[in-house]
Image (tube, rainbow, N blue to C red):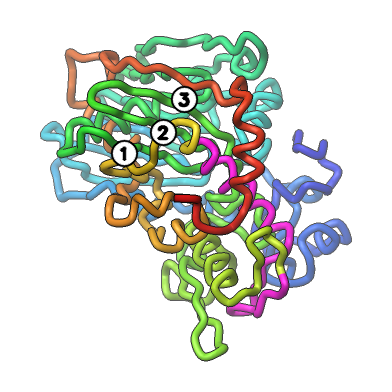
Amino acid sequence: MSRDCGGQGLCGKCRVQTPDLPVLEADRRVLGDTLCARGWRLGCQHAVRPDTADGDEMAQAHIAGTGVTEGTGSTPRLAALDIGTTTVVLALLDDAGTVVKELAWGNPQRAWGADVLSRIDHFASMPPDLIRTLIEPHLQGIDRLVITGNTVMTHLWLGTDPAPLARVPFTIPHPDPVITHHGSRQEIVCAPFAPYVGADIRTGLQEVLAADHAESFLYMDLGTNGELAWYDRGTLTLCSTACGPALEGAGISIGMAALPEALVHVYHEQDRWHGHTAGDVPAQGVCGSGLISWIDALRQADLVTPAGKLKGCPPVEGLQLTQKDIRMFQLAKGALQAGWQLLVPDPAQVEEVWIAGGFSLGLNADACIRLGLFHPAWRGKIRFCGNMALKGACRQVMAEDAMPGDELTARVLELEKDTRFPLAFARAMSLQEAAA
Protein backbone atom coordinates (compact mmCIF):
# COMPACT_ATOMS: atom_id res chain seq x y z
CA MET A 1 0.00 0.00 0.00
CA SER A 2 1.34 3.48 -0.88
CA ARG A 3 2.18 5.97 1.82
CA ASP A 4 3.65 9.49 1.78
CA CYS A 5 7.07 7.94 2.43
CA GLY A 6 6.50 5.05 0.03
CA GLY A 7 6.01 2.55 2.84
CA GLN A 8 9.52 3.11 4.20
CA GLY A 9 8.40 3.74 7.79
CA LEU A 10 9.56 7.36 7.86
CA CYS A 11 6.60 9.76 7.95
CA GLY A 12 4.42 8.26 10.72
CA LYS A 13 1.18 9.27 8.96
CA CYS A 14 -0.01 5.68 8.77
CA ARG A 15 0.16 5.02 12.50
CA VAL A 16 -2.46 2.63 13.86
CA GLN A 17 -3.37 1.59 17.38
CA THR A 18 -3.01 -2.19 17.39
CA PRO A 19 -1.34 -3.25 20.66
CA ASP A 20 -1.33 -6.94 19.69
CA LEU A 21 1.27 -6.33 16.99
CA PRO A 22 4.97 -6.61 17.88
CA VAL A 23 7.02 -3.43 18.33
CA LEU A 24 9.51 -3.05 15.48
CA GLU A 25 12.61 -0.89 15.37
CA ALA A 26 10.87 1.44 12.90
CA ASP A 27 7.98 1.85 15.35
CA ARG A 28 10.33 2.95 18.13
CA ARG A 29 12.35 5.24 15.84
CA VAL A 30 9.35 7.18 14.50
CA LEU A 31 6.77 6.93 17.30
CA GLY A 32 8.92 6.67 20.42
CA ASP A 33 8.67 4.38 23.42
CA THR A 34 5.66 6.13 24.99
CA LEU A 35 3.35 5.74 21.99
CA CYS A 36 4.58 2.21 21.33
CA ALA A 37 3.70 1.32 24.91
CA ARG A 38 0.20 2.67 24.27
CA GLY A 39 -0.22 0.29 21.34
CA TRP A 40 0.60 2.54 18.38
CA ARG A 41 2.43 1.04 15.39
CA LEU A 42 3.42 2.09 11.85
CA GLY A 43 0.76 0.60 9.59
CA CYS A 44 3.09 0.39 6.59
CA GLN A 45 5.47 -1.87 8.55
CA HIS A 46 2.74 -4.31 9.60
CA ALA A 47 0.04 -6.26 7.79
CA VAL A 48 -2.82 -3.84 8.50
CA ARG A 49 -5.82 -3.61 6.17
CA PRO A 50 -7.11 -0.15 5.18
CA ASP A 51 -10.47 -0.84 6.76
CA THR A 52 -8.80 -1.31 10.15
CA ALA A 53 -6.48 1.69 9.97
CA ASP A 54 -6.47 3.79 13.12
CA GLY A 55 -7.62 0.82 15.17
CA ASP A 56 -10.71 1.38 17.27
CA GLU A 57 -11.19 4.84 15.80
CA MET A 58 -12.05 3.32 12.43
CA ALA A 59 -14.24 0.59 13.86
CA GLN A 60 -16.20 3.03 16.02
CA ALA A 61 -19.40 3.94 14.22
CA HIS A 62 -20.50 6.78 16.48
CA ILE A 63 -18.43 9.77 17.51
CA ALA A 64 -20.19 12.54 19.45
CA GLY A 65 -19.56 16.22 19.00
CA THR A 66 -20.54 17.13 15.44
CA GLY A 67 -23.40 19.28 16.63
CA VAL A 68 -26.29 17.54 14.84
CA THR A 69 -29.10 16.84 17.30
CA GLU A 70 -30.50 13.32 17.25
CA GLY A 71 -34.19 12.72 17.78
CA THR A 72 -36.46 9.78 18.31
CA GLY A 73 -38.07 9.86 14.88
CA SER A 74 -39.55 7.00 12.96
CA THR A 75 -37.82 4.76 10.41
CA PRO A 76 -35.20 6.77 8.46
CA ARG A 77 -35.86 7.30 4.76
CA LEU A 78 -33.38 10.08 4.01
CA ALA A 79 -29.67 10.52 4.65
CA ALA A 80 -26.98 13.21 4.53
CA LEU A 81 -23.27 12.46 4.26
CA ASP A 82 -20.36 14.80 4.99
CA ILE A 83 -17.07 13.40 3.70
CA GLY A 84 -14.27 15.19 5.51
CA THR A 85 -10.58 14.63 4.93
CA THR A 86 -10.29 13.26 8.47
CA THR A 87 -13.82 12.23 9.46
CA VAL A 88 -16.87 10.85 7.64
CA VAL A 89 -20.27 11.65 9.20
CA LEU A 90 -23.62 10.19 8.21
CA ALA A 91 -27.01 11.47 9.43
CA LEU A 92 -30.16 9.37 8.97
CA LEU A 93 -33.47 11.27 8.87
CA ASP A 94 -37.12 10.36 8.83
CA ASP A 95 -39.65 11.85 6.39
CA ALA A 96 -40.26 14.79 8.73
CA GLY A 97 -36.59 15.77 8.71
CA THR A 98 -35.78 14.56 12.22
CA VAL A 99 -32.28 13.15 12.60
CA VAL A 100 -32.90 9.62 13.86
CA LYS A 101 -29.26 8.62 14.10
CA GLU A 102 -25.83 10.10 13.50
CA LEU A 103 -22.79 7.95 12.74
CA ALA A 104 -19.15 8.91 12.26
CA TRP A 105 -15.92 7.19 11.29
CA GLY A 106 -12.35 8.15 10.69
CA ASN A 107 -11.86 8.50 6.94
CA PRO A 108 -10.09 5.28 5.84
CA GLN A 109 -8.44 7.20 3.00
CA ARG A 110 -6.02 8.55 5.61
CA ALA A 111 -4.00 5.39 5.07
CA TRP A 112 -2.90 7.11 1.84
CA GLY A 113 -2.02 10.43 3.50
CA ALA A 114 -3.50 12.99 5.86
CA ASP A 115 -4.11 15.77 3.31
CA VAL A 116 -6.02 16.13 0.05
CA LEU A 117 -2.90 16.37 -2.12
CA SER A 118 -1.77 12.96 -0.87
CA ARG A 119 -5.18 11.53 -1.74
CA ILE A 120 -4.92 13.00 -5.25
CA ASP A 121 -1.45 11.49 -5.70
CA HIS A 122 -2.67 8.06 -4.60
CA PHE A 123 -6.00 8.03 -6.46
CA ALA A 124 -4.98 5.10 -8.68
CA SER A 125 -3.97 2.89 -5.74
CA MET A 126 -6.96 3.66 -3.52
CA PRO A 127 -9.92 1.24 -3.55
CA PRO A 128 -12.78 3.22 -5.16
CA ASP A 129 -15.56 2.41 -2.70
CA LEU A 130 -13.87 2.90 0.69
CA ILE A 131 -16.46 5.39 1.95
CA ARG A 132 -19.43 3.55 0.47
CA THR A 133 -18.27 0.35 2.16
CA LEU A 134 -18.45 2.18 5.52
CA ILE A 135 -21.91 3.61 5.13
CA GLU A 136 -23.82 1.20 2.86
CA PRO A 137 -24.85 -1.17 5.70
CA HIS A 138 -26.67 1.80 7.28
CA LEU A 139 -28.49 2.90 4.12
CA GLN A 140 -30.99 0.07 3.84
CA GLY A 141 -34.41 1.59 3.10
CA ILE A 142 -32.97 5.05 2.35
CA ASP A 143 -34.66 6.71 -0.63
CA ARG A 144 -32.43 9.78 -1.04
CA LEU A 145 -28.89 10.65 -0.01
CA VAL A 146 -27.24 14.09 -0.21
CA ILE A 147 -23.43 14.12 -0.19
CA THR A 148 -21.30 17.12 0.76
CA GLY A 149 -17.59 17.55 1.44
CA ASN A 150 -14.53 19.27 0.08
CA THR A 151 -13.98 19.11 -3.66
CA VAL A 152 -11.41 16.32 -3.59
CA MET A 153 -13.55 14.14 -1.31
CA THR A 154 -16.70 14.49 -3.45
CA HIS A 155 -14.75 13.58 -6.58
CA LEU A 156 -13.26 10.53 -4.88
CA TRP A 157 -16.79 9.52 -3.90
CA LEU A 158 -17.80 9.74 -7.58
CA GLY A 159 -14.75 7.72 -8.60
CA THR A 160 -13.44 10.62 -10.69
CA ASP A 161 -9.70 11.27 -10.84
CA PRO A 162 -9.23 14.59 -8.96
CA ALA A 163 -5.82 15.28 -10.57
CA PRO A 164 -7.10 18.38 -12.49
CA LEU A 165 -7.72 20.02 -9.09
CA ALA A 166 -4.00 19.95 -8.32
CA ARG A 167 -2.46 21.26 -11.54
CA VAL A 168 -2.73 24.40 -13.62
CA PRO A 169 -5.29 25.55 -14.73
CA PHE A 170 -6.98 23.93 -11.66
CA THR A 171 -10.21 22.76 -13.27
CA ILE A 172 -13.11 20.99 -11.55
CA PRO A 173 -14.20 17.77 -13.33
CA HIS A 174 -17.70 18.05 -11.79
CA PRO A 175 -18.47 21.77 -11.23
CA ASP A 176 -22.24 21.20 -10.98
CA PRO A 177 -24.42 19.00 -8.79
CA VAL A 178 -24.28 15.33 -9.78
CA ILE A 179 -27.39 13.18 -9.48
CA THR A 180 -27.02 9.41 -9.71
CA HIS A 181 -28.92 6.35 -8.53
CA HIS A 182 -27.67 3.44 -6.46
CA GLY A 183 -30.38 0.85 -6.88
CA SER A 184 -33.64 2.66 -6.11
CA ARG A 185 -31.87 5.33 -4.03
CA GLN A 186 -31.32 8.80 -5.50
CA GLU A 187 -27.89 10.24 -4.62
CA ILE A 188 -27.11 13.95 -5.01
CA VAL A 189 -23.52 15.22 -4.78
CA CYS A 190 -23.58 18.95 -4.03
CA ALA A 191 -21.61 21.34 -6.21
CA PRO A 192 -18.35 22.95 -5.10
CA PHE A 193 -17.56 26.65 -5.45
CA ALA A 194 -13.94 26.21 -6.54
CA PRO A 195 -11.16 23.58 -6.58
CA TYR A 196 -10.47 24.10 -2.87
CA VAL A 197 -13.73 25.66 -1.74
CA GLY A 198 -16.04 22.71 -1.74
CA ALA A 199 -19.63 21.64 -1.41
CA ASP A 200 -19.21 21.58 2.37
CA ILE A 201 -18.96 25.38 2.34
CA ARG A 202 -22.02 25.59 0.10
CA THR A 203 -24.21 23.50 2.39
CA GLY A 204 -22.78 25.13 5.51
CA LEU A 205 -23.53 28.62 4.21
CA GLN A 206 -27.03 27.51 3.26
CA GLU A 207 -27.59 26.58 6.89
CA VAL A 208 -26.25 29.92 8.17
CA LEU A 209 -28.32 31.93 5.70
CA ALA A 210 -31.45 30.02 6.76
CA ALA A 211 -30.77 31.01 10.39
CA ASP A 212 -30.85 34.37 12.14
CA HIS A 213 -27.59 35.98 10.98
CA ALA A 214 -25.90 39.36 10.90
CA GLU A 215 -25.68 41.48 7.77
CA SER A 216 -21.89 41.02 7.73
CA PHE A 217 -20.43 37.76 8.96
CA LEU A 218 -17.35 35.59 8.58
CA TYR A 219 -17.86 31.86 8.21
CA MET A 220 -14.89 29.57 8.81
CA ASP A 221 -14.94 25.80 8.40
CA LEU A 222 -11.82 24.65 10.20
CA GLY A 223 -10.14 21.38 9.36
CA THR A 224 -7.36 20.03 7.20
CA ASN A 225 -8.36 22.60 4.59
CA GLY A 226 -9.52 25.87 6.17
CA GLU A 227 -12.32 27.30 4.03
CA LEU A 228 -13.48 30.86 4.71
CA ALA A 229 -16.47 32.89 3.55
CA TRP A 230 -16.95 36.64 4.01
CA TYR A 231 -20.60 37.64 3.65
CA ASP A 232 -21.18 41.39 3.50
CA ARG A 233 -24.76 42.48 2.86
CA GLY A 234 -25.44 39.97 0.13
CA THR A 235 -21.94 39.84 -1.38
CA LEU A 236 -20.03 36.62 -0.82
CA THR A 237 -16.24 36.25 -1.09
CA LEU A 238 -14.50 32.93 -0.44
CA CYS A 239 -10.99 31.61 0.00
CA SER A 240 -9.25 28.41 1.02
CA THR A 241 -6.08 28.10 3.04
CA ALA A 242 -4.06 24.94 3.62
CA CYS A 243 -4.12 24.55 7.39
CA GLY A 244 -2.86 21.00 7.27
CA PRO A 245 -4.12 18.23 9.56
CA ALA A 246 -2.91 19.62 12.93
CA LEU A 247 -6.27 21.20 13.81
CA GLU A 248 -7.81 17.73 13.63
CA GLY A 249 -5.07 16.04 15.67
CA ALA A 250 -3.20 14.49 12.74
CA GLY A 251 0.50 15.09 12.18
CA ILE A 252 0.96 15.63 15.93
CA SER A 253 3.22 13.16 17.80
CA ILE A 254 0.44 12.28 20.25
CA GLY A 255 -2.45 13.51 18.11
CA MET A 256 -5.75 11.70 17.65
CA ALA A 257 -9.39 12.34 16.79
CA ALA A 258 -11.78 13.65 19.46
CA LEU A 259 -12.44 10.21 20.91
CA PRO A 260 -13.15 9.68 24.64
CA GLU A 261 -9.41 9.15 25.33
CA ALA A 262 -8.37 12.47 23.75
CA LEU A 263 -7.27 15.45 25.83
CA VAL A 264 -9.63 18.33 25.09
CA HIS A 265 -8.53 20.78 27.78
CA VAL A 266 -5.18 21.41 29.48
CA TYR A 267 -4.48 23.97 32.20
CA HIS A 268 -2.12 24.64 35.07
CA GLU A 269 -2.66 26.09 38.51
CA GLN A 270 -0.26 26.42 41.44
CA ASP A 271 2.51 24.86 39.31
CA ARG A 272 0.48 21.73 38.69
CA TRP A 273 -0.65 20.64 35.24
CA HIS A 274 -4.06 19.09 34.61
CA GLY A 275 -5.85 17.63 31.60
CA HIS A 276 -9.40 16.56 30.83
CA THR A 277 -10.36 14.03 28.18
CA ALA A 278 -13.52 13.97 26.10
CA GLY A 279 -14.81 10.90 27.95
CA ASP A 280 -13.32 11.59 31.39
CA VAL A 281 -11.07 8.55 30.96
CA PRO A 282 -7.25 8.19 30.99
CA ALA A 283 -5.66 10.12 28.12
CA GLN A 284 -4.10 8.40 25.11
CA GLY A 285 -3.45 11.51 23.04
CA VAL A 286 -4.64 15.01 22.21
CA CYS A 287 -7.21 16.18 19.66
CA GLY A 288 -7.24 19.51 17.81
CA SER A 289 -9.14 21.52 20.41
CA GLY A 290 -6.97 20.03 23.16
CA LEU A 291 -3.84 21.00 21.24
CA ILE A 292 -4.98 24.62 21.12
CA SER A 293 -5.81 24.58 24.84
CA TRP A 294 -2.43 23.03 25.67
CA ILE A 295 -0.35 25.46 23.62
CA ASP A 296 -2.30 28.37 25.07
CA ALA A 297 -1.54 27.10 28.58
CA LEU A 298 2.16 26.74 27.72
CA ARG A 299 2.20 30.29 26.37
CA GLN A 300 0.59 31.64 29.53
CA ALA A 301 3.19 29.76 31.58
CA ASP A 302 5.96 31.28 29.41
CA LEU A 303 7.04 27.82 28.28
CA VAL A 304 6.53 28.68 24.60
CA THR A 305 7.79 31.93 23.13
CA PRO A 306 5.76 34.03 20.67
CA ALA A 307 8.14 32.74 17.99
CA GLY A 308 7.12 29.18 18.90
CA LYS A 309 10.25 28.01 20.72
CA LEU A 310 9.36 25.32 23.25
CA LYS A 311 11.26 25.87 26.52
CA GLY A 312 9.71 22.86 28.24
CA CYS A 313 6.54 20.83 28.42
CA PRO A 314 5.60 19.37 31.81
CA PRO A 315 3.85 16.01 31.25
CA VAL A 316 0.06 15.89 31.34
CA GLU A 317 -1.20 12.39 32.12
CA GLY A 318 2.15 11.08 30.94
CA LEU A 319 1.96 12.90 27.60
CA GLN A 320 4.13 15.72 26.26
CA LEU A 321 4.21 17.93 23.20
CA THR A 322 7.35 18.27 21.10
CA GLN A 323 8.92 21.20 19.30
CA LYS A 324 7.72 19.70 16.02
CA ASP A 325 4.14 19.67 17.36
CA ILE A 326 4.37 23.40 18.08
CA ARG A 327 5.66 24.04 14.56
CA MET A 328 2.85 21.99 13.03
CA PHE A 329 0.33 24.10 14.93
CA GLN A 330 2.08 27.31 13.87
CA LEU A 331 1.76 26.30 10.21
CA ALA A 332 -1.97 25.68 10.63
CA LYS A 333 -2.53 28.84 12.63
CA GLY A 334 -0.42 30.97 10.29
CA ALA A 335 -2.32 29.78 7.22
CA LEU A 336 -5.70 30.41 8.84
CA GLN A 337 -4.83 33.87 10.17
CA ALA A 338 -3.28 34.96 6.87
CA GLY A 339 -6.41 33.73 5.10
CA TRP A 340 -8.90 35.83 7.05
CA GLN A 341 -6.57 38.84 7.11
CA LEU A 342 -6.54 38.93 3.31
CA LEU A 343 -10.22 38.01 2.95
CA VAL A 344 -11.73 40.57 5.34
CA PRO A 345 -10.90 44.25 4.65
CA ASP A 346 -11.29 45.28 8.29
CA PRO A 347 -11.74 42.71 11.10
CA ALA A 348 -13.65 45.31 13.13
CA GLN A 349 -16.36 45.31 10.42
CA VAL A 350 -17.22 41.69 11.18
CA GLU A 351 -20.49 41.62 13.08
CA GLU A 352 -20.58 37.88 13.64
CA VAL A 353 -18.16 34.95 13.31
CA TRP A 354 -19.42 31.42 12.66
CA ILE A 355 -16.85 28.71 13.42
CA ALA A 356 -17.85 25.41 11.82
CA GLY A 357 -16.35 21.95 11.92
CA GLY A 358 -16.99 19.15 14.39
CA PHE A 359 -14.02 20.05 16.57
CA SER A 360 -15.18 23.69 16.89
CA LEU A 361 -17.58 22.68 19.67
CA GLY A 362 -14.59 22.06 21.96
CA LEU A 363 -12.82 25.36 21.33
CA ASN A 364 -12.32 28.20 23.77
CA ALA A 365 -12.67 31.62 22.11
CA ASP A 366 -10.27 33.40 24.49
CA ALA A 367 -7.53 30.80 23.91
CA CYS A 368 -7.96 31.12 20.15
CA ILE A 369 -7.74 34.91 20.36
CA ARG A 370 -4.64 34.82 22.58
CA LEU A 371 -2.86 32.60 20.05
CA GLY A 372 -3.96 34.70 17.06
CA LEU A 373 -6.32 32.20 15.44
CA PHE A 374 -9.09 34.79 15.76
CA HIS A 375 -8.96 38.59 15.91
CA PRO A 376 -9.41 40.33 19.30
CA ALA A 377 -12.15 42.52 17.75
CA TRP A 378 -14.28 39.36 17.55
CA ARG A 379 -14.66 38.89 21.30
CA GLY A 380 -18.33 38.29 22.05
CA LYS A 381 -19.14 37.76 18.35
CA ILE A 382 -17.98 34.16 17.92
CA ARG A 383 -20.48 31.32 17.48
CA PHE A 384 -19.17 27.74 17.57
CA CYS A 385 -21.69 25.86 15.48
CA GLY A 386 -20.37 22.34 14.86
CA ASN A 387 -20.77 20.50 11.58
CA MET A 388 -22.72 23.05 9.57
CA ALA A 389 -21.92 21.25 6.33
CA LEU A 390 -23.82 18.20 7.56
CA LYS A 391 -26.66 20.33 8.95
CA GLY A 392 -26.98 22.03 5.59
CA ALA A 393 -26.97 18.68 3.80
CA CYS A 394 -29.77 17.54 6.14
CA ARG A 395 -31.72 20.63 5.11
CA GLN A 396 -31.04 19.98 1.43
CA VAL A 397 -32.15 16.35 1.49
CA MET A 398 -35.62 17.62 2.43
CA ALA A 399 -35.75 19.96 -0.59
CA GLU A 400 -36.93 17.54 -3.26
CA ASP A 401 -37.37 20.12 -6.02
CA ALA A 402 -34.28 22.29 -5.39
CA MET A 403 -30.70 21.73 -6.42
CA PRO A 404 -28.59 21.97 -3.25
CA GLY A 405 -27.46 25.57 -2.76
CA ASP A 406 -27.34 26.15 -6.50
CA GLU A 407 -28.47 29.78 -6.17
CA LEU A 408 -25.40 30.84 -4.19
CA THR A 409 -22.78 32.73 -6.20
CA ALA A 410 -19.47 34.04 -4.93
CA ARG A 411 -16.15 35.59 -5.83
CA VAL A 412 -13.19 33.37 -4.95
CA LEU A 413 -9.95 34.91 -3.67
CA GLU A 414 -7.12 32.68 -4.87
CA LEU A 415 -4.51 32.98 -2.12
CA GLU A 416 -1.93 30.96 -4.04
CA LYS A 417 -1.87 33.77 -6.61
CA ASP A 418 -2.01 36.61 -4.08
CA THR A 419 1.44 38.21 -3.75
CA ARG A 420 0.54 39.40 -0.23
CA PHE A 421 0.07 35.89 1.15
CA PRO A 422 3.71 34.82 1.80
CA LEU A 423 4.44 37.83 4.01
CA ALA A 424 1.05 37.62 5.75
CA PHE A 425 1.64 33.93 6.43
CA ALA A 426 5.16 34.51 7.82
CA ARG A 427 3.91 37.21 10.19
CA ALA A 428 0.90 35.12 11.25
CA MET A 429 3.17 32.30 12.52
CA SER A 430 3.66 34.28 15.75
CA LEU A 431 1.77 32.85 18.74
CA GLN A 432 0.20 36.01 20.05
CA GLU A 433 -2.87 38.19 19.54
CA ALA A 434 -3.33 39.56 16.06
CA ALA A 435 -2.63 43.27 15.73
CA ALA A 436 -5.66 45.44 16.36
- Residue 136 visible, this orientation: no
Which residue occupies 54% across, 50% down? 247
Q: Residues within 10 Å of mark 3 (few under 14, many from 20)?
A: many
Which residue occupies 40% across, 54% down? 376
Q: Nearer the viewer, residue 288 or 108?
A: 288
Q: Residues under labels 1 and 3: Cα distance?
A: 23 Å
Q: Give the label, 2 or 3, closer to the camera.
A: 2
Q: Residues under labels 2 and 3: Cα distance?
A: 17 Å
Q: Quadrant of residue 120?
A: top right
Q: Residue furthest front?
A: 436
Check residue 327 for magenta coloring: yes
Q: Which residues are magenta?
A: 311-339
Q: Amino acid at mark 3?
A: Val
Q: Position of residue 102 (x, y in %)?
A: 31, 46
Q: Residues within 10 Å of mark 2 (few under 14, many from 20)?
A: many
Q: Which mark is residue 197?
A: 3
Q: Amino acid at mark 2?
A: Val
Quarter of the image where the N terminus is located? top right
Q: Is label 3 in a helix, a strand or a loop?
A: loop
Q: Earlier in the sequence, mark 1 or mark 2?
A: 2
Q: Is residue 132 left or right of residue 49?
A: left
Q: Quadrant of residue 421?
A: top right
Residue hosting label 2: 344
Q: Position of residue 359 (x, y in %)?
A: 43, 52
Q: Nearer the viewer, residue 51 or 196?
A: 196
